[in-house]
């Protein structure tokens, strides 16, 4: 019976110790209440940036989560020490801890500023290289458009050549079908015409003609007008190579030879 008061005393002490170790009674110090964080802010207000940075790093090393110290360290690296690479690292760490905080937008802008500062510090004038790259991209774009245009012109030219070959093939078949007698009759007439050309009246069909280009004209439509077929556009083009850069380079009011 004499041991009972002692046992009760030991039990009371044990219960007190358990209650004192309960998580609800443990006081957690916030990051901004850390002594090193407050010391770092004092150094920063005095302009002692390197000492402030060291104190912020001590908070980062001591705590598993220290977004505010990462932010302050990144800002010092960017603005005071001109070290954009380390600044980007600490700003990224801040965003890992507080991606949706009201300050997150500002931190992302600071990361962009640090990236530009890093590019500015690179040798060989990277911004000039960027301008050159933009110029080259514009040149490539223009060349691609010109290439596409040339492809379309090539397809159109191949189609016209096929039409011309078809028309020439039909003409050869007609010539082959003529009898030797007809050819014999034609030959003297041709010789006589050549011999008497200075004395004869010119044949209007054989005299070179000209055409003034109107709005909507193409070599095919001009060929249809004078020859009754669009396939002789190439004859008109060949007769005016000194005036036309290509078969599509017609200008309103331009005079063309019609062979």
Image (cartoon, helix red, strand yellow):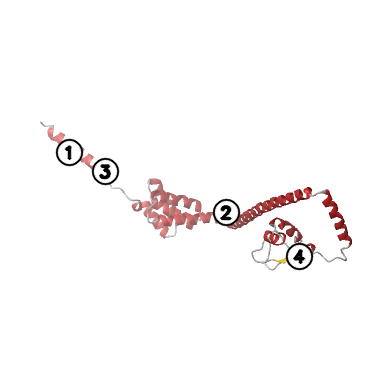
Callout 4 crowding tier (Cα within 10 Å): few <14, some 14–19, many ≥20? few
Residue at 76% across / 50% down in the picture? 174
Question: Which element is circle 2 on?
Answer: loop
Q: Nearer the viewer, mark 1 or mark 2?
A: 2
Residue at 43% across / 55% down in the picture? 107
Q: Quadrant of residue 255?
A: bottom right
Q: Quadrant of residue 135?
A: bottom right
Front-lying residue, 240 or 24: 240
Res 12 label? 1
Determine whether 26 is above or below 212 in the image: above
Left or right for 238, reference 54: right
Res 170 label? none
Residue 23 x/y as whole percent: 26, 43
Q: CA distance from mark 3 to mark 4?
A: 108 Å
Question: Which element is circle 3 on?
Answer: helix
Assign the C terminus to one quadrant of the image. Answer: bottom right
Q: CA distance from mark 2 to mark 4?
A: 69 Å
Confirm whether residue 226 shows in the render: yes
Q: CA distance from mark 3 to mark 1?
A: 19 Å
* Labels 3 and 2: the sequence-earlier one: 3
Front-lying residue, 9 or 61: 61
Q: Which residue is labeled 2 in the image? A: 122
**Mark 4 and mark 3 in contact (Cβ < 8 Å)?**
no
Q: Residue furthest left?
A: 1
Q: Which residue is labeled 3 in the image? A: 23
Q: CA distance from mark 3 to mark 2?
A: 52 Å
Res 209 label? 4
Residue 155 x/y as whole percent: 65, 51
Left or right for 130, reference 56: right
Residue 72 x/y as whole percent: 42, 54
Q: Nearer the viewer, mark 3 or mark 4?
A: 4
């Amino acid at each position: 019976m004499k041991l009972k008061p002692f046992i009760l005393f030991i039990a009371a002490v044990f219960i007190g110790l358990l209650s004192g170790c309960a998580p609800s009674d443990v006081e957690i110090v916030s990051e901004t209440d850390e002594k090193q964080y407050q010391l770092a802010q004092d150094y920063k207000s005095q302009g002692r940036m390197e000492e402030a940075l060291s104190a912020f790093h001590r908070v980062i090393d001591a705590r598993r989560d220290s977004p505010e110290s990462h932010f302050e360290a990144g800002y010092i690296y960017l603005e005071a020490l001109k070290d954009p690479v380390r600044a980007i690292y600490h700003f990224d760490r801040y965003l890992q801890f507080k991606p949706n905080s009201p300050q997150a937008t500002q931190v992302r802008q600071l990361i962009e500023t640090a990236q530009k500062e890093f590019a500015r510090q690179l040798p060989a004038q990277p911004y000039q290289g960027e301008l050159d790259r933009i110029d080259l991209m514009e040149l490539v774009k223009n060349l691609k458009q010109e290439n596409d245009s040339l492809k379309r012109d090539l397809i159109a030219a191949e189609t016209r050549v096929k039409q011309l070959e078809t028309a020439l093939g039909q003409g050869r078949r007609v010539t082959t079908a003529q009898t030797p007698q007809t050819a014999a009759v034609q030959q003297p007439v041709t010789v006589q015409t050549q011999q008497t050309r200075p004395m004869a009246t010119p044949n209007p069909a054989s005299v070179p003609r000209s055409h003034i280009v109107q709005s909507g004209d193409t070599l095919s439509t001009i060929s249809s007008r004078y020859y009754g077929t669009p396939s002789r556009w190439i004859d008109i083009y060949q007769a005016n190579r000194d005036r036309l850069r290509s078969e599509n380079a017609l200008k309103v009011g331009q005079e063309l030879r019609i062979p």
